[in-house]
Image: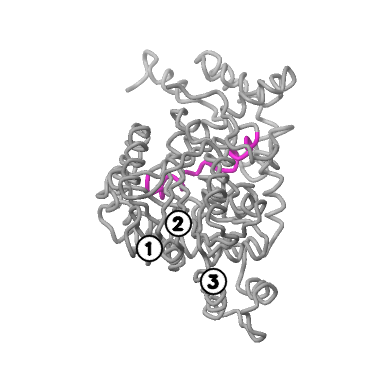
């Protein structure tokens, strides 16, 4: 199967072209408080992760095992999905298939409406953020309460998440206190910004919602094909309240979240908590299989969402992005994310993984600037627990974006200065004779620019490259010239 030359937009709820990343990043960089909040949080998580990962002598073997399991799932995804459906139904659950965001939201909305619920509780779910489920339910008069503390903060502040694991990472304690004072009746007049006091206010607010809800909605970290078991891992316990107290449980899951066997949990329950929250194990690992008499919800519905994933699967290079287990380790080591935060990416998937996943899910025509939101330093690949080669996919998507721009932009785009320059460079680098001639020409042409063994400023369009960099001059003699000179008859050695 060959890679597509373009990647189509996935869901019909997707709006028009997004703001280019450089423009959004420029505004984020001007926000000093944002840079402080993000920098402090990512540094703390990064250091904790390094400590707990360093405790495992077989960490690299676990990474390879995690990658191999996910690759097997993608190779046989059709078979595993059918097996999962059979297993869920055998356990008393119901399976629904959704081609895009609208269909997924319609299925969930119909299930909620069928039970006469006007409010639902939801554990944190990035897939439902992707489909904009909350907004779709609101259009039908159904209020969806977020129960994860960070997601609740985002919801009350009419904000959007900026991190996969810690959605409110851009907010500090003082800002959260002001928000709770303004929006929650449970907040006392003397509320402090102590984390325990803030958590207690949220706990009292959410407890009433849990006890009153008829319907709970969850995402899924993993689903086991052989047993039909669905799993959510979390740190607060709110997810367990959502998945056990309501009479009806609806889980919305991207079709790539499968693992083949129950035994495969042993890999991911070691790698995921260490890579995400820097813990040795998750405080809460909730697993449920269908329904059981007098235990948990009376009805269980699993909604399997494509929303562009089969398009990603068709891309031989890019499909590895579907291996992602949403740990956020790549965000915490990325120098670009650390300075801009997640909002600049304009997607529910920020950071390095968002820079590759979003363009493939939504289309290069909408998110073509995101593959350039990287320095290609490779830190994201080094920490990924399933070994997604993000730098390689970024370069691949940059190629697709360049081809898309040339195709859609007509003659003017095809004759753009950068594109012409790169084609000339390719021609020079593709021929030894032309390359050596270019070396000799550069050696002669650099003399006005080289000072003190450095080229500190290049002219014209190349000036941007040397704004933050110095270049070494072209040497007086290349290696090939030196080798030929030494090999001439009469030379020693």
User: Which of marks 3 and 2 precedes in the sequence?
Assistant: 3
Q: Left or right: where does residue 230 sit relative to residue 216?
A: left
Residue, disc 3 = 206
Q: Are marks 2 and 1 in contact (CB under 8 Å)?
A: yes
Disc 2/disc 1 C-alpha distance (Å): 9 Å
Q: Nearer the viewer, residue 484 or 249?
A: 249
Q: Provide the residue designation for mark 1.
A: 296
Q: Where does the image place residue 77, in percent across and percent down from the top left?
A: 37, 34
Secondary element at image label 2 = strand
Which badge, 2 or 1, comes first in the chain's sequence? Answer: 2
Q: Which residue is mark 2?
A: 249
Q: Residue furthest bottom?
A: 190
The residue depicted at 28 percent of the width and 58 percent of the height is 56
Q: Is residue 85 found inside the magenta-colored segment of the image?
A: no
Q: Is residue 259 above or below residue 47?
A: above
- In which quadrant will I find the C terminus? top left
- How crowded is the residue under tag 1: few (<14 C-alpha within 10 Å), some, or many (20+)? some
Q: Position of residue 441 (x, y in %)?
A: 62, 20
Please tell me whether residue 375 belongs to the stretch shown in magenta: yes
* N-terminal label among 1 and 3: 3
The nearer-to-camera label among 2 and 3 is 2
Q: Report x, y in % for residue 79.
A: 33, 33
Real-space Cα distance between discs 2 and 3? 17 Å
Task: Report if the CB atoms under discs 2 and 3 are less than 8 Å apart.
Answer: no
Residue 110's spot in the image, x, y percent?
56, 48
Q: Which residues are magenta?
A: 366-386
Report the label total: 3
Q: How is the image coloured?
A: one colour
Tell which of 424 and 205 is nearer to you: 205
């Amino acid at each position: 199967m060959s890679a597509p030359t373009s990647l189509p937009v996935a869901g019909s709820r997707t709006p028009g072209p997004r703001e280019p990343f450089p423009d959004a990043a420029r505004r984020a960089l001007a926000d000093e408080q944002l840079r402080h909040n993000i920098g402090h949080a990512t540094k703390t998580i990064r250091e904790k992760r390094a400590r707990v990962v360093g405790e495992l002598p077989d960490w690299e073997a676990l990474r390879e095992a995690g990658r191999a399991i996910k690759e097997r799932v993608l190779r046989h995804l059709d078979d595993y999905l059918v097996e999962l459906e059979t297993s869920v139904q055998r356990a008393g659950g119901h399976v629904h298939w959704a081609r895009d965001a609208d269909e997924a939201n319609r299925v969930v909305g119909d299930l909620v409406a069928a039970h006469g619920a006007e409010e639902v509780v939801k554990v944190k779910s990035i897939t439902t953020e992707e489909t904009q489920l909350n907004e779709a339910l609101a259009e039908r008069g159904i209020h969806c309460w977020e129960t994860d503390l960070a997601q609740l903060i985002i919801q009350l502040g009419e904000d959007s998440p900026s991190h996969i694991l810690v959605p409110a990472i851009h907010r500090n304690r003082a800002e959260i206190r002001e928000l709770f004072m303004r929006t929650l009746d449970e907040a006392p007049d003397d509320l402090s910004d102590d984390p325990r006091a803030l958590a207690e206010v949220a706990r009292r607010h959410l407890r009433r919602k849990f006890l009153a809800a008829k319907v709970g909605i969850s995402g899924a970290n993993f689903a086991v094909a052989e047993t039909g078991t669905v799993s959510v891992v979390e740190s607060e316990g709110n997810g367990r309240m959502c998945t056990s107290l309501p009479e009806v449980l609806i889980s919305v899951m991207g079709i790539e979240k499968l693992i083949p066997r129950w035994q495969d949990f042993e890999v991911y329950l070691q790698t995921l908590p260490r890579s995400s929250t820097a813990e040795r194990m998750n405080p809460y690992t909730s697993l449920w299989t269908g329904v059981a008499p007098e235990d948990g919800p009376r009805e269980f519905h699993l909604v399997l969402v494509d929303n562009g994933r089969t398009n990603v699967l068709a891309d031989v290079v890019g499909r590895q992005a579907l291996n992602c287990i949403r740990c956020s380790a790549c965000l915490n080591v990325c120098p670009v994310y650390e300075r801009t935060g997640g909002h600049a990416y304009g997607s529910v998937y920020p950071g390095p993984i968002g820079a590759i996943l979003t363009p493939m899910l939504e289309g290069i025509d909408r998110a073509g600037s995101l593959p350039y939101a990287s320095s290609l330093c490779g830190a994201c690949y080094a920490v990924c627990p399933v070994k997604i080669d993000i730098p390689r996919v970024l370069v691949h998507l940059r190629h697709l974006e360049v081809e898309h721009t040339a195709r859609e932009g007509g003659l003017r785009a095809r004759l753009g200065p950068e594109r012409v320059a790169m084609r000339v460079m390719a021609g020079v680098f593709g021929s030894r004779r032309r390359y050596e001639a270019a070396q000799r020409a550069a050696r002669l042409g650099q003399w006005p620019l080289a000072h003190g063994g450095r080229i500190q400023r290049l002219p014209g369009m190349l000036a941007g490259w040397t704004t933050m960099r110095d270049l070494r001059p072209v040497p007086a003699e290349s290696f090939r010239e030196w080798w030929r000179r030494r090999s001439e008859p009469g030379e020693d050695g």
